[in-house]
Image (tube, rainbow, N blue to C red):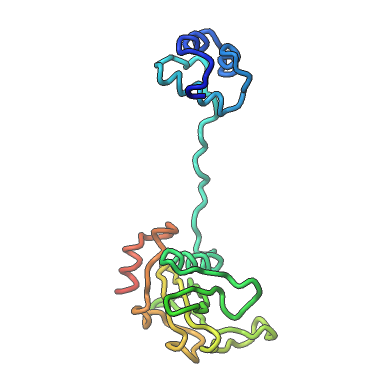
Amino acid sequence: MGSSRTWTDEQLKTAVKTSGSWRAVLRALGLNGTSAAAIRVVRQHAIRLGVDFAHLGSREPAAAPPPEISPDLAHLRQAGPSVAAAWFAIRGCAVPFPVEPTIYDLVASMPEGLRRVQVKTTTSRDGSGWHVAVGRRSYSADKGGPRGPYDPDAVDYFFIVDGDLAMYLIPTWVIAGRVGLALRAYRKYVVGNAAGLLAVGAGADDAAARVSA
């Protein structure tokens, strides 16, 4: 409404005092609108004028609190590619996802060029720390068949997220020929921790400290 409004402050004060609803206020001011936006504008002017409008009730329901959706590491595998993509994207690396099934999960536009990235996650650990499978089965193999190592000529990096949400970026040539890793031996490849972002378990600092311990 602003400078184009057709009613005065005094008319608004009278309309609020003599009306039983915000829609009635609008009608008293000669306004045809009944939308929440129209009511919001009139209400803001009433606030400015210090008019008591408690008798009109709330113009709209109170905002509902956000839903309580708790994080669960059971979903870490599904979240892995998005975590990896966010890590690259915040560093200015464009992250196109393959349109068709490929041997890698995403492509990262890094300073040295496009690099193919395979994302792995793990919630498996023992007394020595987190363990992750980095082998693959061929598309024609049975799901229970043995895994073979990834070809370093087909994948450039592994982006790994462990159960503490520590993130590793490991060049494929470093682990060429392996189908499983004990991540404790690859601590120098830790590039961050997503615990604070995803609000899972301990804070990022505590989780990172456990990884480097």
Eyeballing the image, is 156 above or below 33?
below
The residue lying toward the viewer, choosing from 4 and 208, is 4
Q: Residue at x 58, y 11 (%)?
A: 28
Q: Residue at x 52, y 26 (%)?
A: 40
The residue lying toward the viewer, choosing from 88 and 178, is 88
Count how many numbered circles sit on residues in the image.
0
Q: Residue furthest front?
A: 4
Eyeballing the image, is 135 above or below 43?
below
Q: Residue at x 56, y 74 (%)?
A: 105
Q: Position of residue 160 (x, y in %)?
A: 46, 74
The residue lying toward the viewer, choosing from 199 and 176, is 176
**The quarter of the displayed image where residue 78 is located:** bottom right
Q: Quarter of the image for the C terminus: give it.
A: bottom left
Q: Residue at x 64, y 83 (%)?
A: 144
Q: Residue furthest bottom?
A: 177
**The quarter of the displayed image where residue 192 is located:** bottom left
Q: Position of residue 75 (x, y in %)?
A: 54, 64
Q: Position of residue 11 (x, y in %)?
A: 50, 10
Q: Position of residue 166 (x, y in %)?
A: 40, 70
